[in-house]
Structures are given as C-alpha cells and as structure tokens.
Amino acid sequence: MKIKETIVVEGRDDTAAIKRSVEALTIETHGYGIRQETWDLIAKASETTGIIVFTDPDHAGEQIRKRILERFPDAGEAFLERSEAEKDGDIGIENASPESIRKALEKARVREKNAAESFSQKDMFRWGLTGTSEAAKRRTELGKSLGLGFANSKTFLQRLNSFGVSREEIEKALREL
C-alpha cells in the first residue's frame, strides 16, 4: 500500500514501523520541541504532497498533534487505538502491527472547511456517546470504526463535525456496534 501524503510522526521508531507497513515518506518531530528546520519540512510537505498527522495515542502525542494542527489545519489525521499501540506498558506507533497501521492510514481523515453535516450535544446524547456510564466505551468503538480515534465527548463532537462524517456513516457504525 502506497500513501501519497507525507506522514508526520514523533520519532525514528515510528518511521520504522510505518516503513514496515506501507510505502510512504515520513517526517519526524522528535518529540514536543519541534525545531524550525522540522517546521519548514512539514510546511513544504503540506504544500506539495499534503500531510497526515499520525502521533502516538497518549497525552504527549495529542499535544504534538495539536501543535501541528494549529499551524496546518488542513492536515489529514490518522488515529491508532491505544490498545493497538501498547506493549509492555509503552505506548507508541512503533508497537503497533503493520495491519493496525495500514487500517489507521486507510481511515485517515481530513478536516473539511465547510462540512455539510452539523452535529450537536443532543445527537451525542441520543447516540449514547455522552451522559451514560457506557458513553466512553461507545465513543471508543465508534471512533475505531470511523477512524476518529478516542476522545472525550467535546473533542469527539468536534471531530464528527470537522471531518465531514455523514449522519448515515454514524448511524450505520452505531448499528454495527
């Protein structure tokens, strides 16, 4: 499987895992302290091939993702489930199987500037994605199915609205849960 966009990852072990899984170019941030030289590379890739942000499913990875998306809001995003990225207490893309990495990249999503659908907290309640003891579990499963990753209810709602997910996609995925 060949990925046309450049994949932005945290480190060299993530790059190695990507290269074992797909054919793609990567840029490594080397953690949270992203150097200007790296920002310039990301900018160049964003303008030419486009980028997919694919960081670890942990707090540090989310913070790095957030920083990159502030500068490149049109970037694609790929998400890996925490359970797929964990090995001996260590969480990272480098721990995921090639199959898990391929699936995450196949489901990569790009934010849409004017997404047609608009979902609300009412929808989240109706679908059992907030306000119940099972809500986090349902968001986890739905996020996995739709390629949105895990998120609290506020962030999940933002992802539903900004990634252009259709009502039909959501309802179909919920029926399959």
Image: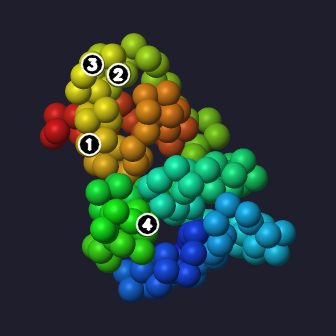
Binning the other alpha carbons within 10 Å of mark 1 as few (below 14), some (14 to 19) or many (20 upward) gives many
Q: CA distance from mark 1 to mark 4?
A: 20 Å
Of circles 1 and 4, the one toward us is: 4
* Mark 4, secondary structure of its residue: loop
Q: Residue furthest right?
A: 36
Total of numbered circles in the picture?
Answer: 4
The disc, 2 or 4, on the residue closer to the chain's N-terminal end is: 4
Q: Compare marks 1 and 2 and give the one earlier in the sequence.
A: 2
The residue lying at 55 percent from left, 38 percent from top is 162
Mark 4 or mark 3: whose residue is earlier in sequence = 4
Tell me the quarter of the image containing the C terminus: top left
Q: Is residue 131 left or right of residue 46?
A: left
Residue 69 to residue 13: above or below: above
Q: CA distance from mark 2 to mark 4?
A: 27 Å
Question: Is there CB contact under 8 Å for labels 3 and 2?
Answer: yes
Q: The residue tagged with tag 3: helix, strand or loop?
A: loop
Residue 113 placement: quadrant: top right
> Disc 1 marks which residue?
141
> Residue at (16%, 34%) from the top-left corner?
175
Within-10-Å neighbours for mark 2: few <14, some 14–19, many 20+: many
Closer to the eye: label 3 or 1: 3
73 or 82, which lies in front? 82
Kindly identify which numbered label has been placed on residue 92. Answer: 4
Q: Which residue is labeled 2 in the image?
A: 130
Disc 2 residue type (three-letter): Thr
Residue count near mark 4 (Cα–Cα under 10 Å), binned few <14, some 14–19, many ≥20? many
What amino acid is found at the position of numbered circle 4 in the picture? Answer: Gly
Residue 74 percent location from the top left of the image: 66, 52
Q: Position of residue 44 (x, y in %)?
A: 77, 72
Between label 2 and label 4, give the one nearer the viewer: 4
- For label 3, the crowd category at 10 Å Cα-Cα, with few meaning under 14, some 14 to 19 and many 20 or more, is few
Closer-to-camera residue (118/37): 37
